[in-house]
Amino acid sequence: MATLAGAVLLAQLLLWLAPGDAVDIITGDPELRAAMIAQWGLDQPVLVRYASFVGRAVTGDLGTSLTYRPGVPVAELIGPASARSLALVFGALVASLTWGVGLAYITAGRRSLARRLVQIVSVAPVFLLAWLLMVTLNETTFSLMEAGHISRPTWFALPDEDSALKTSLAVLVLACGSSALTEVHAAAEDALTRIRRSGYVDAARARGAPLWPIVLLNLAPPLSSLAASRAAFFVGGLVIIEKVLHLNGVGAMLWQACRMRDYPLALGITVVAAAAVCGARLAADLLRVTLDPRLRETG
């Protein structure tokens, strides 16, 4: 709860410090401007506006959009966009964990060229990797069209409409870019190395028991913590990836809400994003406690 309140306060302060306000987007008439400022409460101190928003949000009322979609409830705008963005985050999370653990299984405890290749590819920032993929794909497709090898694809040149291709690109970039895959790979390698050297694995090996169930069971707690931290990173990356690839998700909506000074919408998205991150951390902690009895021991 404190994390949610802190995130909303920070967003409120940033919006308040930014030049201009929502009324500037709509009118320059002095009388109309004064009336709208009073109606929307923009003349109130920032802490009063913050307390008012939190009080309404506790009851489920996130307010109505001021400039993005004037008069439309914020919850109605965020719902569909959040579902699209959640698919990106979940896909990137599954991809990064699958690839990272798979590579770690091969490279843990030994020298490997794959580790260096992962570091080289993953070091590129998310926005740069997305841009490079988009440009390469468009230029290659255009060359093939010019040569007469293919007809114009429906997605060329990555139009504003959402598509399976752009969603796949977004998942790939989020899962790999800004060292995401490198960090997952390194953490999984460290965990696998410790597990393989543990006494319970040696005992299972001596009994002739299969090792993979034991390894997976003991790998799950550290992976759950890693997944929670990666989820927070991916949620933050939505603003960049959706803007670069023109995806209609909650990240692109937050960008527009801040640009148009739509305070209720920006704060509503902040609440949803913070709640998603807190929920991921809580789920990871519950899974770790369930799988590792040592964490349930007291005193």
Image (cartoon, rainbow, N blue to C red):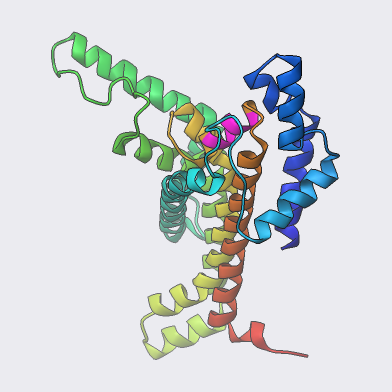
Count the marks.
Answer: 0
Residue 287 in magenta stretch: no
Q: Nearer the viewer, residue 92 or 163?
A: 163
For this view, does 13 lie left or right of residue 203? right
Note whether residue 134 is visible: yes
Determine whether 95 is above or below 177 in the image.
below
The residue sitting at 52% across, 27% down in the picture is 128
Classify residue 40 by image quadrant: top right
6 vs 125, nearest the viewer: 6
Quarter of the image for residue 106 reads bottom left
Q: Is 4 on the left or on the right of 293, as rendered? A: right
Using the image as rendered, state which of residue 162 and residue 12 is in the foreground.
Answer: 12
Q: Foreground residue, 60 or 252?
A: 60
Q: Residue at x 56, y 44 (%)?
A: 74
> Image check: 186 left or right of 49?
left
Q: Residue at x 58, y 75 (%)?
A: 286
Q: Main secondary structure of the magenta part?
A: helix
Residue 8 lies, in percent from the top left, at 72, 48
- Residue 215, percent from left and from top: 46, 74
Compared with 260, 176 (above or below) is below
Is the residue 286 above or below the residue 108 in the image?
below
Percent x, y of residue 188: 53, 60
Quarter of the figure with the N terminus = bottom right
> Quadrant of the image for the C terminus?
bottom right
| Looking at the image, residue 201 lies above or below residue 3 | below
Query: Is residue 82 shown left or right of residue 27?
Result: left
Residue 53 location (% of width, % of height): 72, 49
Which quadrant would residue 33 be assigned to in this image?
top right
State the extent of the magenta-drawn residues as a range.
253-258
